[in-house]
Image (tube, rainbow, N blue to C red):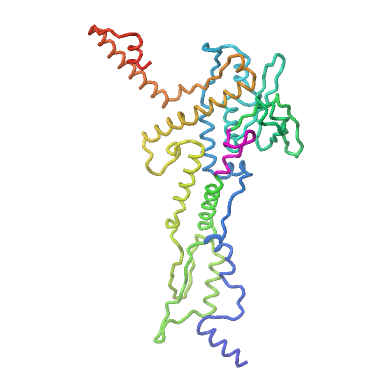
Protein backbone atom coordinates (compact mmCIF):
# COMPACT_ATOMS: atom_id res chain seq x y z
CA UNK A 1 0.00 0.00 0.00
CA UNK A 2 2.84 2.34 0.81
CA UNK A 3 4.40 1.97 -2.63
CA UNK A 4 0.99 2.50 -4.19
CA UNK A 5 0.47 5.71 -2.31
CA UNK A 6 3.87 6.98 -3.34
CA UNK A 7 3.10 6.17 -6.98
CA UNK A 8 -0.29 7.85 -6.75
CA UNK A 9 1.46 10.96 -5.50
CA UNK A 10 3.71 11.14 -8.54
CA UNK A 11 0.77 10.31 -10.79
CA UNK A 12 -1.25 13.17 -9.38
CA UNK A 13 1.64 15.58 -9.60
CA UNK A 14 3.02 14.76 -13.07
CA UNK A 15 -0.03 13.18 -14.71
CA UNK A 16 1.88 9.92 -15.14
CA UNK A 17 0.10 6.54 -14.94
CA UNK A 18 1.88 3.22 -14.59
CA UNK A 19 1.24 0.32 -17.04
CA UNK A 20 -0.54 2.47 -19.61
CA UNK A 21 0.20 0.25 -22.58
CA UNK A 22 -2.54 1.85 -24.70
CA UNK A 23 -0.84 5.18 -25.02
CA UNK A 24 -2.20 7.66 -27.52
CA UNK A 25 0.95 7.63 -29.65
CA UNK A 26 0.79 3.83 -29.96
CA UNK A 27 -2.63 4.07 -31.51
CA UNK A 28 -1.19 6.17 -34.34
CA UNK A 29 2.24 4.61 -34.78
CA UNK A 30 1.40 3.42 -38.29
CA UNK A 31 0.30 6.87 -39.42
CA UNK A 32 3.39 8.49 -37.89
CA UNK A 33 5.67 6.03 -39.69
CA UNK A 34 3.89 6.73 -42.96
CA UNK A 35 4.41 10.45 -42.53
CA UNK A 36 8.03 10.47 -41.49
CA UNK A 37 8.97 7.59 -43.77
CA UNK A 38 10.75 4.29 -43.36
CA UNK A 39 14.44 3.54 -43.31
CA UNK A 40 14.39 1.65 -46.60
CA UNK A 41 13.28 2.91 -50.02
CA UNK A 42 10.12 1.50 -51.58
CA UNK A 43 10.17 1.07 -55.36
CA UNK A 44 7.37 0.18 -57.75
CA UNK A 45 7.17 -3.14 -59.57
CA UNK A 46 8.09 -2.22 -63.13
CA UNK A 47 6.37 -5.37 -64.42
CA UNK A 48 3.01 -3.75 -63.62
CA UNK A 49 3.31 -1.06 -66.29
CA UNK A 50 -0.39 -0.97 -67.17
CA UNK A 51 -1.35 -0.65 -63.49
CA UNK A 52 0.96 2.35 -63.15
CA UNK A 53 -0.48 3.83 -66.34
CA UNK A 54 -3.99 3.65 -64.83
CA UNK A 55 -3.05 4.95 -61.39
CA UNK A 56 -0.31 7.56 -61.89
CA UNK A 57 -1.76 10.64 -63.63
CA UNK A 58 1.61 12.05 -64.69
CA UNK A 59 2.53 8.84 -66.52
CA UNK A 60 -0.86 8.60 -68.19
CA UNK A 61 -0.75 12.26 -69.26
CA UNK A 62 2.65 11.85 -70.95
CA UNK A 63 1.83 8.51 -72.59
CA UNK A 64 -1.58 9.70 -73.83
CA UNK A 65 -0.22 12.99 -75.15
CA UNK A 66 2.43 11.14 -77.15
CA UNK A 67 -0.17 8.66 -78.45
CA UNK A 68 -2.67 11.35 -79.45
CA UNK A 69 0.03 13.33 -81.26
CA UNK A 70 1.17 10.24 -83.18
CA UNK A 71 -2.45 9.42 -84.07
CA UNK A 72 -3.03 12.92 -85.46
CA UNK A 73 -1.29 12.12 -88.76
CA UNK A 74 -2.99 11.52 -92.10
CA UNK A 75 -1.63 8.32 -93.74
CA UNK A 76 -0.81 8.75 -97.44
CA UNK A 77 0.17 5.80 -99.64
CA UNK A 78 2.78 6.24 -102.37
CA UNK A 79 4.31 3.96 -104.95
CA UNK A 80 7.58 5.49 -105.93
CA UNK A 81 6.88 9.21 -106.37
CA UNK A 82 3.20 8.79 -107.23
CA UNK A 83 0.42 8.99 -104.67
CA UNK A 84 -1.91 5.98 -104.68
CA UNK A 85 -5.64 6.60 -104.30
CA UNK A 86 -6.93 3.05 -104.55
CA UNK A 87 -5.43 0.06 -102.73
CA UNK A 88 -6.49 -2.57 -100.20
CA UNK A 89 -4.17 -0.94 -97.62
CA UNK A 90 -6.17 2.28 -97.90
CA UNK A 91 -9.36 0.23 -97.42
CA UNK A 92 -7.77 -1.28 -94.33
CA UNK A 93 -6.88 2.18 -93.03
CA UNK A 94 -10.45 3.38 -93.58
CA UNK A 95 -11.81 0.43 -91.57
CA UNK A 96 -9.12 -1.46 -89.67
CA UNK A 97 -11.50 -3.48 -87.46
CA UNK A 98 -15.06 -3.60 -86.17
CA UNK A 99 -14.71 -1.01 -83.39
CA UNK A 100 -11.78 1.29 -84.11
CA UNK A 101 -10.70 3.98 -86.53
CA UNK A 102 -7.13 4.12 -87.79
CA UNK A 103 -6.44 6.91 -85.30
CA UNK A 104 -7.62 4.60 -82.50
CA UNK A 105 -5.31 1.87 -83.78
CA UNK A 106 -2.26 4.15 -83.80
CA UNK A 107 -3.17 5.49 -80.36
CA UNK A 108 -3.36 1.95 -78.94
CA UNK A 109 -0.11 0.87 -80.60
CA UNK A 110 1.60 3.96 -79.20
CA UNK A 111 0.35 3.34 -75.65
CA UNK A 112 1.55 -0.27 -75.73
CA UNK A 113 4.90 0.82 -77.14
CA UNK A 114 5.25 3.46 -74.40
CA UNK A 115 4.55 0.96 -71.63
CA UNK A 116 6.32 -2.13 -72.99
CA UNK A 117 8.51 -0.98 -75.93
CA UNK A 118 6.60 -3.68 -77.86
CA UNK A 119 3.31 -3.43 -79.74
CA UNK A 120 1.39 -6.09 -81.63
CA UNK A 121 -1.49 -6.25 -84.09
CA UNK A 122 -3.42 -9.23 -85.36
CA UNK A 123 -3.42 -8.87 -89.17
CA UNK A 124 -4.05 -12.23 -90.91
CA UNK A 125 -3.53 -12.39 -94.65
CA UNK A 126 -6.45 -13.41 -96.85
CA UNK A 127 -6.49 -14.44 -100.51
CA UNK A 128 -3.89 -12.76 -102.74
CA UNK A 129 -2.05 -11.63 -99.53
CA UNK A 130 -4.69 -9.00 -98.83
CA UNK A 131 -5.17 -7.91 -95.21
CA UNK A 132 -8.60 -6.60 -94.21
CA UNK A 133 -8.29 -6.81 -90.42
CA UNK A 134 -5.86 -4.88 -88.22
CA UNK A 135 -6.56 -5.47 -84.51
CA UNK A 136 -4.10 -4.14 -81.90
CA UNK A 137 -3.30 -6.61 -79.12
CA UNK A 138 -2.35 -5.80 -75.51
CA UNK A 139 1.39 -6.31 -75.19
CA UNK A 140 1.20 -7.64 -71.64
CA UNK A 141 -0.83 -10.60 -72.94
CA UNK A 142 1.68 -11.51 -75.66
CA UNK A 143 4.61 -13.92 -75.43
CA UNK A 144 7.23 -14.07 -78.19
CA UNK A 145 8.90 -17.44 -78.75
CA UNK A 146 12.10 -17.12 -80.75
CA UNK A 147 13.80 -19.68 -82.99
CA UNK A 148 17.08 -19.29 -81.12
CA UNK A 149 18.98 -18.46 -84.32
CA UNK A 150 18.80 -14.68 -84.13
CA UNK A 151 22.26 -13.89 -85.48
CA UNK A 152 21.84 -15.90 -88.67
CA UNK A 153 18.57 -14.43 -89.92
CA UNK A 154 17.96 -11.56 -92.32
CA UNK A 155 14.20 -11.36 -91.69
CA UNK A 156 12.56 -10.66 -88.32
CA UNK A 157 9.99 -13.40 -88.97
CA UNK A 158 12.81 -15.97 -89.25
CA UNK A 159 13.85 -15.06 -85.72
CA UNK A 160 10.40 -15.70 -84.23
CA UNK A 161 8.85 -19.17 -83.99
CA UNK A 162 5.34 -18.16 -82.87
CA UNK A 163 3.32 -15.87 -80.65
CA UNK A 164 1.11 -16.75 -77.70
CA UNK A 165 -1.84 -14.54 -76.82
CA UNK A 166 -3.15 -15.11 -73.29
CA UNK A 167 -6.86 -14.71 -72.51
CA UNK A 168 -8.40 -13.49 -69.24
CA UNK A 169 -8.80 -17.06 -67.98
CA UNK A 170 -5.11 -17.83 -68.43
CA UNK A 171 -5.60 -19.93 -71.55
CA UNK A 172 -3.53 -18.95 -74.56
CA UNK A 173 -4.02 -18.96 -78.30
CA UNK A 174 -1.12 -19.62 -80.63
CA UNK A 175 -0.74 -17.09 -83.44
CA UNK A 176 1.30 -17.71 -86.56
CA UNK A 177 4.19 -15.38 -87.34
CA UNK A 178 2.52 -14.26 -90.59
CA UNK A 179 -0.64 -13.26 -88.73
CA UNK A 180 0.97 -10.72 -86.40
CA UNK A 181 2.49 -7.30 -86.98
CA UNK A 182 5.24 -6.87 -84.39
CA UNK A 183 6.56 -3.36 -83.70
CA UNK A 184 9.21 -2.49 -81.15
CA UNK A 185 11.38 0.35 -79.92
CA UNK A 186 15.01 -0.86 -79.56
CA UNK A 187 16.69 -0.63 -76.19
CA UNK A 188 20.20 -0.77 -77.64
CA UNK A 189 20.82 -4.37 -76.55
CA UNK A 190 18.04 -6.81 -77.40
CA UNK A 191 17.24 -7.71 -81.00
CA UNK A 192 13.76 -8.92 -80.02
CA UNK A 193 11.56 -8.11 -77.02
CA UNK A 194 13.43 -5.00 -75.80
CA UNK A 195 13.22 -3.79 -72.21
CA UNK A 196 10.40 -1.43 -71.37
CA UNK A 197 11.07 2.26 -70.87
CA UNK A 198 9.22 1.92 -67.57
CA UNK A 199 12.40 0.25 -66.27
CA UNK A 200 14.18 3.59 -66.61
CA UNK A 201 11.30 5.33 -64.81
CA UNK A 202 11.31 3.07 -61.75
CA UNK A 203 12.62 5.75 -59.40
CA UNK A 204 10.65 8.83 -60.53
CA UNK A 205 7.41 6.82 -60.69
CA UNK A 206 8.09 5.47 -57.20
CA UNK A 207 8.66 9.00 -55.93
CA UNK A 208 5.45 10.23 -57.55
CA UNK A 209 3.49 7.49 -55.79
CA UNK A 210 5.19 8.30 -52.50
CA UNK A 211 4.47 12.01 -52.92
CA UNK A 212 0.76 11.42 -53.46
CA UNK A 213 0.67 8.96 -50.57
CA UNK A 214 2.36 11.35 -48.18
CA UNK A 215 0.10 14.24 -49.14
CA UNK A 216 -2.96 12.05 -48.64
CA UNK A 217 -1.79 10.95 -45.19
CA UNK A 218 -1.20 14.56 -44.20
CA UNK A 219 -4.66 15.57 -45.42
CA UNK A 220 -6.73 12.61 -44.28
CA UNK A 221 -5.25 10.71 -41.37
CA UNK A 222 -3.55 13.24 -39.15
CA UNK A 223 -4.22 16.86 -38.41
CA UNK A 224 -1.64 19.23 -37.04
CA UNK A 225 0.99 17.45 -34.91
CA UNK A 226 1.98 19.11 -31.69
CA UNK A 227 1.75 19.22 -27.90
CA UNK A 228 -1.16 20.40 -25.78
CA UNK A 229 0.42 21.48 -22.54
CA UNK A 230 -1.05 23.08 -19.45
CA UNK A 231 -0.76 26.83 -18.94
CA UNK A 232 -1.54 26.71 -15.22
CA UNK A 233 1.29 27.67 -12.93
CA UNK A 234 1.99 28.70 -9.40
CA UNK A 235 5.01 29.77 -7.43
CA UNK A 236 6.58 26.34 -7.98
CA UNK A 237 6.17 26.46 -11.76
CA UNK A 238 3.77 24.80 -14.21
CA UNK A 239 0.94 22.70 -12.85
CA UNK A 240 0.35 19.56 -14.98
CA UNK A 241 -3.08 18.40 -16.08
CA UNK A 242 -4.77 15.87 -13.94
CA UNK A 243 -5.00 12.42 -15.57
CA UNK A 244 -8.73 12.80 -16.18
CA UNK A 245 -8.20 15.99 -18.19
CA UNK A 246 -5.41 14.42 -20.21
CA UNK A 247 -7.41 11.29 -21.01
CA UNK A 248 -10.49 13.29 -21.93
CA UNK A 249 -8.55 15.41 -24.42
CA UNK A 250 -6.88 12.34 -25.93
CA UNK A 251 -10.21 10.54 -26.30
CA UNK A 252 -11.77 13.61 -27.87
CA UNK A 253 -8.87 13.97 -30.31
CA UNK A 254 -9.08 10.31 -31.25
CA UNK A 255 -12.84 10.38 -31.95
CA UNK A 256 -13.11 13.67 -33.77
CA UNK A 257 -13.17 14.18 -37.53
CA UNK A 258 -10.27 15.98 -39.16
CA UNK A 259 -12.17 19.27 -39.45
CA UNK A 260 -13.58 19.30 -35.94
CA UNK A 261 -12.18 21.36 -33.09
CA UNK A 262 -11.21 20.17 -29.63
CA UNK A 263 -13.25 22.00 -27.00
CA UNK A 264 -11.98 21.70 -23.45
CA UNK A 265 -12.28 23.59 -20.19
CA UNK A 266 -8.64 22.93 -19.47
CA UNK A 267 -6.29 25.88 -19.78
CA UNK A 268 -3.89 24.52 -22.44
CA UNK A 269 -1.24 25.81 -24.78
CA UNK A 270 -0.57 24.45 -28.28
CA UNK A 271 3.03 23.83 -29.32
CA UNK A 272 3.23 22.71 -32.98
CA UNK A 273 5.65 19.96 -33.89
CA UNK A 274 4.64 19.50 -37.53
CA UNK A 275 6.83 20.26 -40.51
CA UNK A 276 5.27 22.80 -42.92
CA UNK A 277 4.02 21.00 -46.03
CA UNK A 278 5.59 23.55 -48.34
CA UNK A 279 8.98 22.86 -46.76
CA UNK A 280 8.67 19.17 -47.59
CA UNK A 281 9.00 20.24 -51.26
CA UNK A 282 6.53 17.58 -52.37
CA UNK A 283 5.41 19.60 -55.39
CA UNK A 284 8.98 20.34 -56.46
CA UNK A 285 9.74 16.62 -56.26
CA UNK A 286 6.62 15.87 -58.31
CA UNK A 287 7.68 18.34 -61.01
CA UNK A 288 11.20 16.93 -61.16
CA UNK A 289 9.86 13.39 -61.56
CA UNK A 290 7.45 14.53 -64.27
CA UNK A 291 10.37 16.07 -66.15
CA UNK A 292 12.05 12.66 -66.15
CA UNK A 293 8.94 11.11 -67.71
CA UNK A 294 8.75 13.82 -70.36
CA UNK A 295 12.42 13.37 -71.28
CA UNK A 296 12.21 9.58 -71.55
CA UNK A 297 9.35 9.86 -74.05
CA UNK A 298 11.01 12.63 -76.04
CA UNK A 299 8.36 15.30 -75.48
CA UNK A 300 8.57 18.85 -74.13
CA UNK A 301 7.52 19.99 -70.67
CA UNK A 302 5.69 23.06 -72.04
CA UNK A 303 3.13 20.78 -73.71
CA UNK A 304 1.75 19.99 -70.28
CA UNK A 305 0.12 22.06 -67.53
CA UNK A 306 2.48 24.54 -65.90
CA UNK A 307 2.09 26.71 -62.83
CA UNK A 308 4.58 29.22 -64.15
CA UNK A 309 6.79 29.89 -67.15
CA UNK A 310 4.32 28.63 -69.77
CA UNK A 311 4.05 31.47 -72.26
CA UNK A 312 2.30 31.18 -75.61
CA UNK A 313 5.69 31.14 -77.35
CA UNK A 314 7.05 28.42 -75.06
CA UNK A 315 4.02 26.20 -75.59
CA UNK A 316 4.09 26.71 -79.34
CA UNK A 317 7.81 25.96 -79.58
CA UNK A 318 7.40 22.97 -77.26
CA UNK A 319 4.71 21.43 -79.46
CA UNK A 320 6.77 22.06 -82.59
CA UNK A 321 9.88 20.48 -81.05
CA UNK A 322 7.92 17.44 -79.88
CA UNK A 323 6.56 16.86 -83.39
CA UNK A 324 9.81 17.40 -85.26
CA UNK A 325 12.13 15.62 -82.81
CA UNK A 326 9.98 12.68 -81.72
CA UNK A 327 6.44 12.31 -83.04
CA UNK A 328 7.06 12.55 -86.78
CA UNK A 329 10.14 10.27 -86.95
CA UNK A 330 8.66 7.67 -84.57
CA UNK A 331 5.34 7.55 -86.41
CA UNK A 332 7.10 7.26 -89.75
CA UNK A 333 9.24 4.44 -88.39
CA UNK A 334 6.06 2.68 -87.27
CA UNK A 335 4.54 3.02 -90.77
CA UNK A 336 7.74 1.79 -92.42
CA UNK A 337 7.69 -1.34 -90.29
CA UNK A 338 3.98 -1.97 -90.93
CA UNK A 339 4.39 -1.67 -94.72
CA UNK A 340 7.45 -3.91 -94.66
CA UNK A 341 5.74 -6.63 -92.60
CA UNK A 342 2.67 -6.47 -94.84
CA UNK A 343 4.99 -7.28 -97.76
CA UNK A 344 4.34 -4.00 -99.61
CA UNK A 345 7.78 -2.40 -99.30
CA UNK A 346 9.33 -4.84 -101.78
CA UNK A 347 6.73 -3.70 -104.34
CA UNK A 348 7.80 -0.08 -103.93
CA UNK A 349 4.97 1.11 -101.67
CA UNK A 350 5.57 3.73 -99.02
CA UNK A 351 3.12 4.88 -96.31
CA UNK A 352 3.77 8.49 -95.42
CA UNK A 353 2.71 9.96 -92.05
CA UNK A 354 1.50 13.44 -93.05
CA UNK A 355 1.44 16.03 -90.26
CA UNK A 356 1.37 19.10 -92.49
CA UNK A 357 -2.16 19.98 -91.33
CA UNK A 358 -0.96 20.59 -87.74
CA UNK A 359 -1.19 24.33 -87.04
CA UNK A 360 2.26 24.85 -85.52
CA UNK A 361 3.85 22.95 -88.40
CA UNK A 362 1.88 25.01 -90.93
CA UNK A 363 3.52 28.06 -89.43
CA UNK A 364 6.89 26.54 -90.32
CA UNK A 365 5.72 25.99 -93.88
CA UNK A 366 4.53 29.61 -94.07
CA UNK A 367 7.92 30.82 -92.89
CA UNK A 368 9.64 28.67 -95.50
CA UNK A 369 7.33 30.06 -98.20
CA UNK A 370 8.09 33.64 -97.15
CA UNK A 371 11.82 32.93 -97.17
CA UNK A 372 11.60 31.37 -100.64
CA UNK A 373 9.58 34.34 -101.89
CA UNK A 374 12.25 36.71 -100.58
CA UNK A 375 14.98 34.73 -102.33
CA UNK A 376 12.98 34.63 -105.56
CA UNK A 377 12.54 38.40 -105.41
CA UNK A 378 16.28 38.83 -104.91
CA UNK A 379 17.01 36.55 -107.88
CA UNK A 380 14.62 38.55 -110.05
CA UNK A 381 16.42 41.79 -109.21
CA UNK A 382 19.75 40.19 -110.03
CA UNK A 383 18.45 39.07 -113.42
CA UNK A 384 17.03 42.54 -114.12
CA UNK A 385 20.49 43.92 -113.46
CA UNK A 386 21.75 41.81 -116.42
CA UNK A 387 23.79 39.53 -114.17
CA UNK A 388 24.06 36.16 -115.83
CA UNK A 389 23.79 33.21 -113.44
CA UNK A 390 24.00 29.57 -114.34
CA UNK A 391 21.04 27.32 -113.52
CA UNK A 392 23.05 25.74 -110.71
CA UNK A 393 23.84 29.18 -109.23
CA UNK A 394 20.18 30.17 -109.40
CA UNK A 395 19.09 26.98 -107.61
CA UNK A 396 21.74 27.50 -104.96
CA UNK A 397 20.56 31.07 -104.41
CA UNK A 398 16.98 29.82 -103.96
CA UNK A 399 18.15 27.13 -101.57
CA UNK A 400 16.87 24.31 -103.81
- Using the image as rendered, state which of residue 395 and residue 306 is in the foreground: 395
- In screen coordinates, is 373 left or right of 246? left
Residue 218 in sight from this viewpoint = yes
Outermost residue, front side: 152
Q: Is residue 101 magenta?
A: no
At 72% from the left edge and 36% from the top edge, which residue is drawn? 166
Q: Residue at x 31, y 13 (%)?
A: 376
Assign the magenta stretch its main secondary structure.
loop
Quarter of the picture holding the N terminus: bottom right
- Is residue 135 among what the camera can see? no
Residue 197 lies in the magenta stretch? yes
Q: Nearer the viewer, residue 18 or 107?
A: 107
Write down the quadrant of residue 333 in the picture. top right
Give the tally of numbered discs: 0
Left or right relative to 387: residue 86? right
| Residue 4: % across, % down | 60, 89
Q: Nearer the viewer, residue 265 or 278?
A: 278
Where in the figure is residue 96, as x and y percent of width and height? Answer: 63, 22
List the single residue furthest toward the right.
Answer: 171
Where are the magenta residues, as a range? 185-200
Residue 169 pos. (x, y %): 75, 39
- Find residue 7 and report its image quarter: bottom right
Tell me the quarter of the image containing the C terminus.
Answer: top left
**Residue 213: horizontal and vertical position, in percent?**
54, 53
Q: Is residue 278 left or right of residue 182?
A: left
Residue lying furthest left: 385
Amino acid sequence: MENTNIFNFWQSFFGYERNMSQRFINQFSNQVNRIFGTKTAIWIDTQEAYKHYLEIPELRAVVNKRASMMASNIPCLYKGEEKVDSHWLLDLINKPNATQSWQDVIFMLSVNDALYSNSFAYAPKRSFNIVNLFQPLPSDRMVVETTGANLKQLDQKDMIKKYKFYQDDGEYETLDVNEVIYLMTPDGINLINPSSRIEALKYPLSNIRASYHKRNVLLENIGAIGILSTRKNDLGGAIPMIPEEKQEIQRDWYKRSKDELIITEADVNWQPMSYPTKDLMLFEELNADKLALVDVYGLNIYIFSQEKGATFSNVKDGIRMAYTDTIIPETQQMYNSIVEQLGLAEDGYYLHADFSHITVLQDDENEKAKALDTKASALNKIQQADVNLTEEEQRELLGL
